[in-house]
Image (cartoon, grey):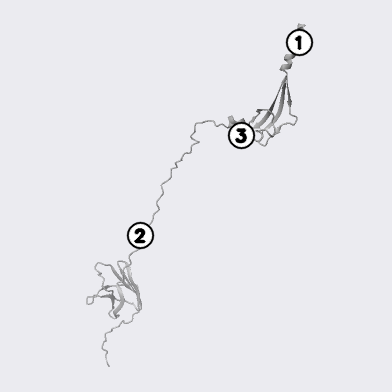
């Protein structure tokens, strides 16, 4: 009698600890967000429970195999969840940033590069860029006397007559330098010698302090050739 009771008790304990698992015959359900789950039913004595064995790949390439309570189908909230929501639920530990001390390479630094100072290019001085002040002409252009016999010519000067004291005066007739001076009788005239072998028309160039103040062609009109008559012997 006691043997039969012990056998029944052993069978009861065995049945209570025995569990059977049946998987959904439709296979795994794959959602658009990448979550794949297959529903299974666990049967125990006087009890049964449904769960879903799932597979999900995290952004870093690692996989997660979470177990979700209940049946997984197209109507499950996780089926229509976004990838960001699944990443936060299944890959939260991987996505959480690890605080690190900033390194010198992470912070932008300014690189100081030694460069040669800009070289100043030689440029003309400000005084060289200022054009020379043009001097007024010395001669008015009139010739009051021209005598090739005595090699003298008078040029009329401008009014008022400039002061030539201390000035470097140079007059060239037909390219030959001549000697000139202010006429002692009429100070408005500049009397010059006519260089030998000069014929008119000829160019007249006047320089005052090395600056050309007159440059013109004198045609020779009005020049008188005075010759002294010598008596001739008569037979």
- Few, some or many residues within 10 Å of mark 3 (<14, 14–19, 20+): few
Q: Which residue is mark 3?
A: 85
Confirm or deny contact between disc 2 and disc 1 (CB under 8 A): no
The earlier-in-sequence mark between 3 and 1 is 1
Out of 164 and 5, give the one closest to the viewer: 5
Determine whether 138 is above or below 130 in the image: below
Q: Position of residue 150 (x, y in %)?
A: 27, 79
Where residue 36 sits: x, y (%)? 68, 32
Badges 3 and 2: C-beta atoms under 8 Å apart? no
Of residue 109 and residue 171, the one placed in the foreground of this image is: 109
Rounded to the nearest whole Å, what is the CA distance between mark 3 and mark 2?
80 Å
**Residue 55 shows in the view:** yes
Q: Which residue is the site of mark 2?
A: 128
- Rounded to the nearest angstrom, the CA distance separating label 2 from label 1 is 130 Å
Q: Secondary structure at mark 2?
A: helix
Q: What crowding class fits label 1: few (fewer than 14 Cα within 10 Å), some (14-19), or many (20 or more)? A: few
The residue tagged 1 is 7
* Helix, strand or loop at mark 3: helix
């Amino acid at each position: 009698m006691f043997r039969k009771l012990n056998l029944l008790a052993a069978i009861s304990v065995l049945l209570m600890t025995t569990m059977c698992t049946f998987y959904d015959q439709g296979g795994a359900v794959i959602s658009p967000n990448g979550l794949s789950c297959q529903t299974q039913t666990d049967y125990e004595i006087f009890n049964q429970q449904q769960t879903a064995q799932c597979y999900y790949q995290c952004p870093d390439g690692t996989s997660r195999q979470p177990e979700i309570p209940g049946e997984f189908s197209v109507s499950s909230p996780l089926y229509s969840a976004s990838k960001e929501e699944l990443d936060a639920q299944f890959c939260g530990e991987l996505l959480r940033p690890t605080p690190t001390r900033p390194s010198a390479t992470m912070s932008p630094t300014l690189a100081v590069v030694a460069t040669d100072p800009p070289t100043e290019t030689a440029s003309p001085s400000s005084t060289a860029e200022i054009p020379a002040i043009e001097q007024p002409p010395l001669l008015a252009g009139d010739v009051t006397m021209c005598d090739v016999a005595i090699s003298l010519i008078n040029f009329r000067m401008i009014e008022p007559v400039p002061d030539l004291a201390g000035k470097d005066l140079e007059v060239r007739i037909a390219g030959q330098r001549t000697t000139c001076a202010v006429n002692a009788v009429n100070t408005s005239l500049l009397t010059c010698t006519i260089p030998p072998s000069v014929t008119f028309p000829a160019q007249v160039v006047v320089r005052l302090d090395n600056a050309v103040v007159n440059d013109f062609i004198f045609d020779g009109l009005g020049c008188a050739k005075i010759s002294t008559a010598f008596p001739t012997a008569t037979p």
